[in-house]
Structure formats: C-alpha cells, structure tokens
Amino acid sequence: MLLIFVALAALGVGRYPVAPSTILQFVLHPLHLAAAVDPTDQQVLLELRLPRIIAAAIIGAALAISGTAFQAIFHNPLVSPDLLGVSNGAAAGAAFAIILGYHSAGIQVSAFIGGLLAVSAAITIQHLLHTRGSLTLVLAGIIISGFMQAIIGLLKYLADPDQQLPSITYWQLGSLEKVTLTNLGLNLPTLLIAGIVLYALRWRLNLLSLNQLEATTLGANLRLEQGVVILCATVLTASAVCLSGTIGWIGLVIPHAARLVNGQNNAKSLPLAAVFGAIFLLLLDSLARTVSAGEIPLGILTGFIGTPLFVWLLLKKRVTLS
Amino acid sequence: MTELTAKGLSFGYAKTPLFSDIDFQLHSGQIHCILGPNGVGKSTLLNCLAGVYRPTSGAIMLDDQPLAKVTPAARARKIAYVPQMSSERTPVSFSLRDYVLLGRAPYLGLLAAPSQRDIAQADKLLQRFGLAARAENSYSAVSGGQQQLASIVRALLQEPALIIFDEPTSALDVANQVRVLQLIRQLAHDGYGIVLTTHDPNQALLLNDQVSTLAQDGRWHSGAAANILTSENLSQVYQLPLQVIELPDSHQKTCIVDQAAFRSLQGD
C-alpha cells in the first residue's frame, strides 16, 4: 500500500511538477474512469517518470532480495550482493563498452556479461582451491573484486578525459536517468525469473543458513541449492546493476531493516525486504531528481543515507557480529 | 525396524588416517554409545554415519541400501542429527518455533514452507519438552539446556528411525547430564535407535546397551556394555589406569581412577 502511494507521489515530483489531481486522472484514465490528461503531462508521466519509477522499485527490490539471500547462505549479516564481485565486474564491463564507444544497450550488455564473468571467475578460483567452504568463496570474491577494480582503474587511465572518463565515473555512481521502457523491458524477464525463484525459495533459505553439517542432515542438497541461490542472486544483481550502474548499501542495509521488523525467518523477512528496498530506492531517486537542478548520482545518496541508517539499525538490534 | 551398518570404515585427511577398519551396527530401539578420548575422531565417525562425510574406504548401509545412494531428503527422514552444543556453531537467531520447524524440511518440497499441521506438530512437541513459553524467543537467547532440547525437538520432527547425538552431555552439569541420558533411554524405549558419543565411561555404564571404544591409536572395540567396559580395555583406551568396580549393595558398576595409581602418577 505504502509502496503504491510512494510511487504515485513520485510521479508528481521533479523538474516539471504534475498536480496530484492530474496523476489521479492519469491512473484512472486507462480504467475508463476519468478523462485523458493533457498531452504534455501524459508524455512526461508515461515516457519519463513511469519507466524510472518502475525501475527504481524493481531495482530496489532486486538488490534487497539478493542481499537477503546472500546474507542467509553465507551465514553472515555483513554480506552484500556484490560480495562475489558482480558489481565491480559489471562496472569493468561497462567501462570497457564506454571506451569502445558503445551506447546504452551495448554498455548494458557488456556490464551484464562483466558481472557474470566476475562471479564465474570467483567460483572457478574456489574450485581450483579444492575447497567447498563458503569462506573460500568469499575470499575468491574479494580477489576478483580487486582484480576488476584494477581493470576499471586501467580503463579510466586510458579513457578520454573529456567524454569517456566522466561517463565511467557517472556509471559507477549509479543513476536511473538512462532508464527507458525499452531497456527496462530488456532486463525485466531475467529480473522477474530470478526474483520469483528466490521468493519461492524463501523458507528454504532458513535451512541453508544453518552450518553445512546441520543443513545436510536436515536433507538439504547443499551444493545444488546453494548454487541455485547464488545464480539467481547474481543474475538479479547483475540485471539491476546494468540498468542503473552500481548502487551500494541497499543490498546490505535493507535486509537488516526487514529482519528488525519481521524477525529472522526469511520466509517473512524476504518479501518485506523487497518492499522496503523498492520504497527506499523510489524515495532516494525522487530526492535525486528534486533537490538540485542537476541530478545527484544515486550511489552518493544511498551512501549518505544508507550508512547512518545502518548504524542506527545495528544500535537498535544490538547485533553481535561475531 | 531400521538398521544402519558400517563395514571396514576408514577415514583420513590427506595422508593421515584418523581411524580405520571400523565395524558398526545400530538398529531401532538400541542405544549405541561410542567412547573415547578427545580428538580421536568420534565426531568424524558420526559425520560419516550421518552421510555428511564420505568415508575413505568401507561401506555404510541404511537397511539394504548404500547410504551414499540415498538422497539427502530420504536420508533425513530416516536419520536425524543432534549437533554438539558448542560456541563454534554458526549462531542461530531464529525463534525456537522457526528453528524446530526446520525438522520438517525433509518432508517439504524445495519451494514449500511448513503447513499449519507442521506448526501444530511442532507446538505440541515444544509443549511436551516444556519449551512452549519460549516458542517466540530467539534460539540464541535461551539457555544451553533449552537449546539442546530444541535441537532434540527438531530431530523428532524429522520423524526419524535413528538419532545421532554428538557429545549430548558435554556442555551440561551433572543433573542435566543425567536428564539427557534419561531422555535418551526413553527415546530408545519409544523405538528410536540412538548412537551417541561421550568421553565419560560412567555414562556408557548407566545406559548399559551397546558400546564401542575408539582409542588414541585407532583401535576399535565394539560389543555389549559388559564385554567392552572392562578395566583393562578402558585403561588402554584412555592411556590411564582406570578400574571398573561393582558397588557392594546395588551391584551397579562404576568406573574410577585408581587412587594409588593417581598419587604415583608423575607428570611426564
């Protein structure tokens, strides 16, 4: 309910304000309950704001769901969805495409591939080390993230400082400015499928959050089930990141907020995290569009608002992180 | 009637063997107590019997099927595992009810969650074990004894034939140790086959059923309590002069450290 209200309010705000009555008219018109709205308003709402609002809600939910899943299977509340190097891999892929002079669709595809490549590399390293523990996987993720950062650094160094460098930096800070109905539609299937699978597995996440011994003796096929969760969470993050660039903190902080309200049971906290994530990113994106004439990159806002929020949540929960 | 048998079981990390050539047998209604000093591989043996570790060699059969061929879910419907209560466990912060409900996992599909029937079954068992008032509390916030009871409730919700207990008494005071042993006896009486590890020979004497000993040098003896729990065998297992004596009035057997030998022991 709150999500719908926030979404409707977000339709109204921005450089070109639209009156609440017009929004109501815009929503009710397709249901044949109201007259058509003014063509200019119609265009702003349908082509600029609506895709962006849908994207904000979906990306926020996607990052929060994959954060919840990762925190469960790695038994660690400090894990975020880019643990295995998805974000840095995607950023490297995007930077690569920018240097090669590609535009939006090319950058997105390249970012998605980069993200998946980074995670595959992390999993390969884990296999090379002949261990199956999640700690090795985390370590492999850190290694790959570091490597991808080096690539990004190199690409930035090579980039043309007038055009390419700012767009790489801007991409790394995250924004929903470039979202259109077309590229949203392109990513929607993967986002929906991966999101629905994780939603369906939400009770099972409780089982996977136990240690290996207990999960196995309770009948979990650990390797297979963890693999499915990692795959879905990675696809979810990669799709989100290639739409919006890297947006930090949501995947880490929002699952904590949801657990604070709904308890530790993932069956209850995962759906709430999705709603919280959607509302949070929607609010921040509206803020990004309205506080100043130019847009504030989202990554900056999530950092400024997400970090104190995280401290507050930790204080509230008095969590022991040992 | 369910039966778990192991023949010629060996396990080792890399090139160092932990134990080798172990024969083990357990069936419904039986208590099998595995005794041995710390660090000889008792827990590892349990992990093999639970199907978590693959033994280096040897065969484990669950009824007439090789254990390795049984699917994880089917195995979990036959064998439950009550882990050792130790600080090294991954912290669990679910409510007690959510925690014990994980025992229903082997009966639920990948995408399913516990039904109202499952929840009612869990609440009934929590009630029986005096945990009903704690059902909403976080697992990490209740006492060690209550955590252990919750783990037992979770095992019972698996509706298994056999239950494996890893050091069920190691974290408890004497009174609670005895309570757990009584509970284990009751469970065996109810028809569950039970295997447990302990380092206290007196617990094996109290339970008085099947006993196996695993010594530091890897030697393994298995049989009825009266045949295994002898002064000679226990002294060899623990590398310490131990005596099994019979108390004059009750004829109850108990294992003691010989005091004369204790005094003459030099710290070497």
Image (tube, coloured by chain):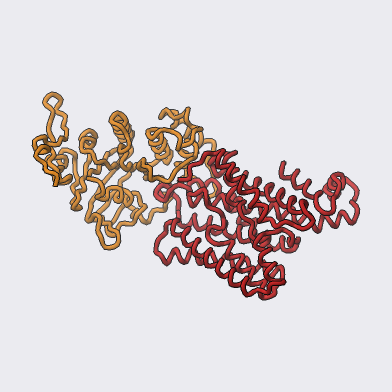
Q: Please name whichever residue, A238 or A36, is drawn nearer the observer in this view of the structure.
A: A238
Above or below A75: residue B157: above
Count of numbered circles in the view? 0
Hue used for the chain lettered A: red
Which image quadrant: the N terminus of chain B? Answer: top left
Q: Residue at x 90, y 56 (%)?
A: A39
Place of residue A214 in the rendered image (x, y in percent of width and height, measured from the top left) = 41, 47
Out of B73 and A42, give the one closest to the viewer: A42
User: Is B37 left, or right, of A127 in this rendering?
Assistant: left
Residue A70 placement, left or right of A27: left
Instruction: Classify residue A13 as left or right of residue B127.
Output: right
Q: Quadrant of residue B181?
A: top left
- Chain B colour is orange
Q: Quadrant of residue A268?
A: top right
Rendering coords of residue B149 (x, y %):
39, 34
- Is residue B189 visible from the viewing direction of this image? no
Q: Is residue B210 above or below residue B44?
A: above
Where is residue B12 drawn, in percent x and y? 28, 58
Pick out the residue farthest to the top: B249
Closer-to-camera residue (B117/A259): A259
Residue B55 sits in quarter: bottom left
Instruction: Name the residue: 87% across, 44% down.
Output: A21
Residue B16 appears in the rendering: yes
In depth, the one of A65 and A157 nearer the eye is: A157
* x, y percent for residue B5: 28, 49
Q: Is residue B117 above or below residue B130?
A: below
